[in-house]
Image: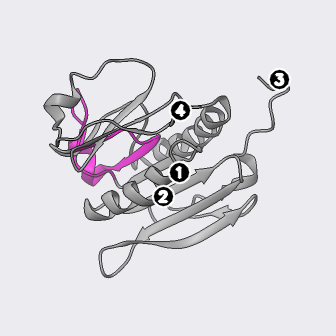
Amino acid sequence: MGMALEEVAATKLTYEDYLLFPEDGRRHELIAGEHYVTPAPTTRHQRLLARLFRVLSEQVEKYTLGEVLFAPVDVVLSPEDVVQPDLIFLSNSRRQRLTAKNIQGAPDLVVEVISDASRRLDKKLKRALYSRYDVREYWLFDPELRIAEIYRRDGENHLVKVAEYEDTGELTSTLFPGLTLDLASLWPPEPEGSA
């Protein structure tokens, strides 16, 4: 089996280069001008993401908090840093970053659903990137291990881990007043087929 995550470019690429990448069903991202490619997500990944999107969208609409979007949507942090997070939240104060083509600047919340192919990218490179670009919260969900990690911006302006949940727990966030997210309800059951 080949590498699922490929570092493709030896020279620094920009958003202009990124726009020329093929639409091939894989996720293409730039971090510090380096091109990263991950395969299409699994059904388990997508089912967890759909459940999370539904819960957060209801909360955002109920309290008119902003906008929730899911991949694929380009988040342009700089000309050399373009990512497609699994899910993002833009508060009303950052909503002007939403354009007809992409998001220009950091969302308040970035959510990534980890896979074996994206583990290093999501846990190390993207966490550092989101910390540098003023993302307020970063949530990581691992559907294989049923672990959720929550990072929040600290007084030093870094994203630091404030909680880790295994299988169950109640996630709360200052971004979503009144929300208590029951993690056990997010994890999708094993599919019957094993292909």
Q: Which residues are magenta?
A: 81-107
Which residue matches tag 2?
A: 123
**Residue ID at (51%, 36%):** 4
Where residue 113 appears, as percent x and y from the top left, is: 55, 45
Q: Is residue 134 left or right of residue 66?
A: left
Task: Single out the residue that lies furthest toward the front.
Answer: 1
Report, in whole angstroms, how far the alpha carbon at label 4 lies from the one at label 3: 24 Å
Which residue matches tag 4?
A: 2
Q: Which mark is residue 193?
A: 3
Q: Is residue 143 left or right of residue 113?
A: right
Q: Mark 4: which secondary structure?
A: loop
Q: Is residue 83 magenta?
A: yes
Front position in the image: 149 or 173: 149
Which residue matches tag 1?
A: 119
75 relative to 169, above or below: above
Identified by mark 1, the residue type is Arg
Mark sitting earlier along the chain (4/1):
4
Identified by mark 2, the residue type is Lys
28 relative to 21, above or below: below
Mark nearest the camera among 4 and 3 is 4
